[in-house]
Amino acid sequence: MALHRFEWAFRQPGRYLEGPYESPGIEIEDGRDDLDEALRRLPPGARADLGRLVERIDAEFERRTLPDPGWVSDWTGGRWWWWRLRER
């Protein structure tokens, strides 16, 4: 599901990214949280494979968003993808 969120969002035109769901609180950043958790739990070979895919996802996500240094909080716990602005 996490990969699907990014696949869907990156297929959308323009810079603004939205998740594939209408439900509040289900953001593509949640999908990145899930990928981060998977990277921590996978064995080394699978972690390397997923890591290469996540690097490409991160690069595209960073390209299509802007930094929001004013939003950094303890809640984000170093998860930089929550510190990005998605603009319309």
Image (cartoon, helix red, strand yellow):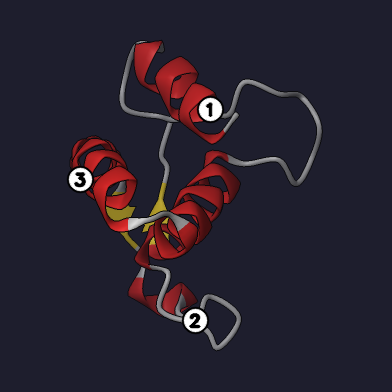
Mark 1, other Cα within 10 Å: few <14 / some 14–19 / many ≥20:
many
What residue does disc 3 label?
A: 55
In this view, the residue in front, 44 or 66, is: 44
Task: Please tell me whether mark 1 sits on a helix, a strand or a loop.
Answer: helix
Q: Nearer the viewer, residue 8 or 65?
A: 8
- Is there a contact, CB below 8 Å, between mark 1 and mark 3? no
| Separation of residues labelled 1 and 3 (CA atoms) | 15 Å
Q: Which residue bears the numbered disc 2?
A: 77
- Mark 3 near mark 2, Cβ–Cβ under 8 Å? no
First in sequence, mark 1 or 2: give its number. Answer: 1
The residue where tag 1 is placed is 5
Picture coordinates of residue 30 (x, y %)? 59, 49
Residue shown at 48% from the left, 74% from the top? 71
Q: Earlier in the sequence, mark 1 or mark 3?
A: 1
Outermost bottom residue:
74
Q: Residue furthest right?
A: 23
Q: Residue at x 28, y 37 (%)?
A: 57
Give the quarter of the figure containing the N terminus.
top right
Estimate the x, y position of residue 39 in percent, counting from the top left. 40, 56
Is 82 positioned to the left or the right of 64 in the image? right
Amino acid type assigned to the residue bearing label 1 in the image: Arg
